[in-house]
Amino acid sequence: VNNEFVTLPSSFGQQVTINQVGYNVEVQTNFGLRVLYDTFYHAEVHVPSNYQGRMCGLHGHCQQLVFSAEVKTKTERYRRGDACGLMAAAGGPFSACHGVVNPEQHVIDCVFDLCVMDGDRATLCENLQAYAIICQQAGRQIMPWRNSSFC
């Protein structure tokens, strides 16, 4: 916090508390904001319902992409079952999770990340790991998806 290490749990008056929740760091404010961050890749932001329709952010401001044949080709490649599409593959290692945590937005986010990172394998693995953790937190058993040559 402010370039200083703090031990968890920590609080700052009545305004902010910071806790460890499973693999995540959780930040809560007195006005209802809740942020979960796995300190590696995945973040979730929860706000009270009175903020509905008044939020903007990266998703709202990063949609000015110029689509070309190269982007379309990369997108198709990254959506395949040997990349981001592994999260949504019927009968795949994450299929037991699909009924509880819809993989589609995770696949979309993964494809975007791989396009930005030019197909970086570590980025793919980070996306798959984030989805795996979400599935496990939802109480779903996932099948092995890592091996000696993949992630």
Image (cartoon, grey):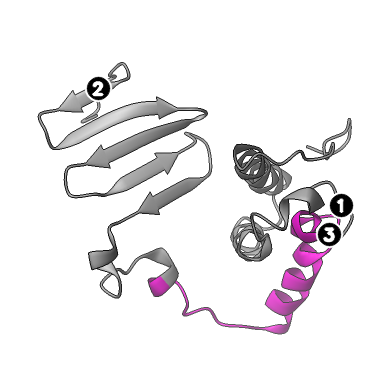
What's the mark number on residue 92?
Answer: 1
Q: Position of residue 115 (x, y in %)?
A: 64, 63
Q: List the residue tagged with mark 2.
A: 10
Distance Cα–Cα, label 2 vs label 3: 41 Å
| Location of residue 54 with respect to 96 vertically, above or below | below
Q: What range of the chain is rendered magenta?
A: 60-88
What's the mark number on residue 55?
Answer: none
Please tell me which residue is depicted at 38% across the width and 73% down the height of the picture.
61
Q: Earlier in the sequence, mark 2 or mark 3?
A: 2
Helix, strand or loop for the magenta stretch, by majority: helix
Q: Is residue 79 magenta?
A: yes
Residue 34 appears left or right of 30: right
When asked about the image quadrant of residue 80, the answer is: bottom right
What's the mark number on residue 89?
Answer: 3
The residue nearer to you, when weighing 4 against 117, is 4
Q: Position of residue 14 (x, y in %)?
A: 11, 33
Under mark 2, the amino acid is Ser
When asked about the image quadrant of residue 76, the answer is: bottom right
Please tell me which residue is depicted at 76% across the width and 38% down the height of the picture.
141
User: Contact, CB < 8 Å: mark 1 with mark 3?
Assistant: yes
Distance Cα–Cα, label 1 vs label 3: 5 Å
Q: Position of residue 100 (x, y in %)?
A: 65, 54
